[in-house]
Amino acid sequence: MDDLIRQAAHRLAEGRLVAFPTETVYGLGADAENEAAIARIYAAKGRPSNHPVIVHVADGSDLEYWASHVPAQAYALIDAFWPGPLTLILPRADRVPAAVAGGQATIGLRCPAHPVAQYLLKAFTQLKGGNAGVAAPSANKFGQVSPTQAGHVLAEFAELDDDDLLVLEGGASEVGIESTIVDLSRLDSVGPVILRPGHITADDIARVLEIKAESLLPSERQSADDAGQERQSEAPRVSGSLKAHYAPRTPLHVLSRDEIFDWVGQLTQEQLPIACVVFDTLNAAEQPGVEWILVPKDPKAYARKLYALLRQLDKGGFRGLVFEQPPGEAAWRAVNDRLGRAAAAFSR
Ligand code: TXA
Ligand code: MG
């Protein structure tokens, strides 16, 4: 493995693409300071070039290289959560190519905990003689489900050969959904804001910053008030925040238990087969063409399985996927966010 990782670091230095495991999802990486290499990421993903990419670093020691200003809140969060599934948005240093930030004045920074990602980042840093970063979005086509296994990445980029893309194997991702993103670039105007919920929750962040968790979630604040609207419209673009995202190809709907029960009873032959993903067996009559799948009642265990399950179901030849609505509690926020976006792709 060591040899392969060194080879991967050399590829990055040559401006080539390397997909690597992280604890959240697999990333499609390139040298963050090489504009041609970054363009290769956008081309492979089919992603609009105005969407920013996260820069992955080996540790928190050279933040000033990437960010023009690093506030005390950033250091506090790094102390608490790096390496780990947390991305910080900071004002971008001038030396960092605008291309990596989709042209925005900010930069997203994350230090992943997965040992393979750590080895790769350290090897690449050594090769560059310090201050190295790997730009990496999730290793999937734009709008599709993020990969949590090396095999998912290979399936996603089947058109690329070994020369174009090296995929490092790192097992199934522990967390299973993308990192929590905290915006610290607008502290003076709006304060710290969570742009994408994840494994590290609003409560976790609020505890470290010694603030109220609700203040981190402007979109969930009661306010239909002007300030709330303004906060939203100023917010940086986060492609993961597009309403429809993370979607399988099979139509997906999120329904309550009762709705599922009623719906299954009324299915016509043309609507079958379908898969129903539920927390407990429903007392519905056995019905040919309806497959029942049980999922964990713990939100973190659920998140770990979600994307692999979506990919598996997508290959199952189903006409539709029905997911039981998870609880509305804060612990389920990240899962509800991803499920909601997956379903939004089909709610037109
Ligand atoms: O867990 C993760 O974050 C994974 C792994 C590979 O690290 N990466 C990931 O990348 O999910 P991606 O590109 O699929 O999603 C990153 C999100 C995007 O929605 C992007 O818009 C946002 O982060 N982002 C990156 N840089 C940003 C910036 N400067 N300002 C605002 N949003 C930014
Ligand atoms: Mg993504």
Image (cartoon, rainbow, N blue to C red):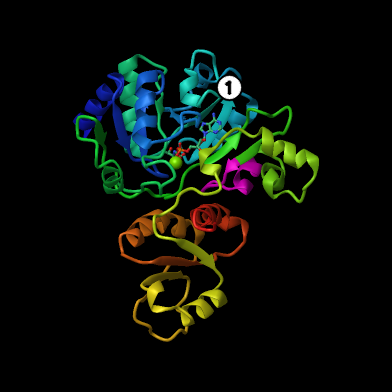
Closer-to-camera residue (161/221): 161
Q: Which residue is mark 1?
A: 105
- Please state if 234 lies on the left or on the right of 168 as rendered: right
9 shown above or below 259: above
Ligand 2 quarter of the rendering = top left
Q: Give the residue displayed 54% in from the left and 66% down from the top.
A: 325
Which range of residues does the magenta coloring cover? 195-208
Q: Give the residue displayed 52% in from the left and 55% down from the top.
A: 335
Residue 81 in picture, x, y percent from top left? 52, 38
Residue 85 in picture, x, y percent from top left? 48, 41
Q: Give the residue displayed 42% in from the left and 44% down from the top.
A: 24
Query: Three-letter amino acid code at disc 1?
Result: Ala
Residue 274 in picture, x, y percent from top left? 39, 71
For the image shown, how many numbered marks are present on the structure? Answer: 1
Residue 78 appears anywhere in the view: no
189 shown above or below 226: above
Residue 345 appears anywhere in the view: yes
Closer-to-camera residue (39/191): 39
The question of residue 188 being in magenta is answered with no
Image quadrant in which the N terminus is located: top left
For residue 44, which quarter of the picture? top left
For residue 116, which quarter of the picture? top left
- Please state if 87 lies on the left or on the right of 58 as rendered: right
Residue 319 in picture, x, y percent from top left? 38, 66
187 shown above or below 113: above
